[in-house]
Amino acid sequence: MNILDENVLESQRQLLGRWRVPVRQIGHDVGRKGMADAEIIPFLLTLSRATFFTMDWDYYRQKLVHAEYCLVFLDVSRTEAAAFIRRLLHHSEFDTSLKRMGHVIRVSAMGLVTWQLRVEREARFDWVG
């Protein structure tokens, strides 16, 4: 399940919908409006294989890596979030929920940087194509 933080613009959620990228948004489809950051991780653990997309830098931390979810920090313009979400979901290293589990990912125009479960160093991936 792909979950968008409240800080992802409505226009970007709608664009993902037009592209047939299945997403739900905190405060719109799941959870409740105004959920505190401290409530997000426990909420994700109640879901099956959730990938959480946020514009909040605080989620890009090694200590947040967990086998049951994926956190994605979108280090891009708010108006480009949908394009980079779609790009990540089509990247050969992360194109299934199983491949994403156990990762905390920073997405930028330069590529992807990740923390992974049981790996002590960040890994870097280039955009393909």
Image (cartoon, grey):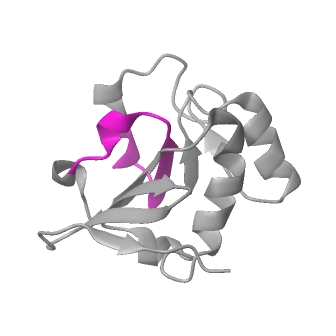
State left or right for residue 129 relative to residue 37: right
Q: Quadrant of the N terminus?
A: bottom right
Instruction: Say whether residue 48 is visible.
Output: no
Q: Is residue 102 visible?
A: yes
Going 24% across and 66% down the picture, which residue do you hit? 122
Image coords of residue 45 (percent x, y): 33, 49
Q: Which residues are magenta?
A: 41-61
Please check the rendered image and state whether residue 121 is part of the magenta-colored stretch, yes or no: no
Please count the marks in the image. 0
In the picture, the quarter occupied by the C terminus is bottom right
Q: Residue at x 29, y 72 (%)?
A: 123
Query: Does the magenta run of residues contain 49?
Result: yes
Q: Is residue 128 above or below residue 121?
A: below
Q: Residue furthest top?
A: 34
Q: Residue at x 56, y 32 (%)?
A: 26
Spot the residue most to the right. 18
Indicate whether 66 appears above or below 117. Answer: above
Q: Is residue 7 above or below residue 3?
A: above
Task: State which quadrant residue 124 falls in.
Answer: bottom left
Which x, y percent locates residue 3? 55, 46
Considering depth in this image, is 51 or 124 the residue closer to the camera?
124
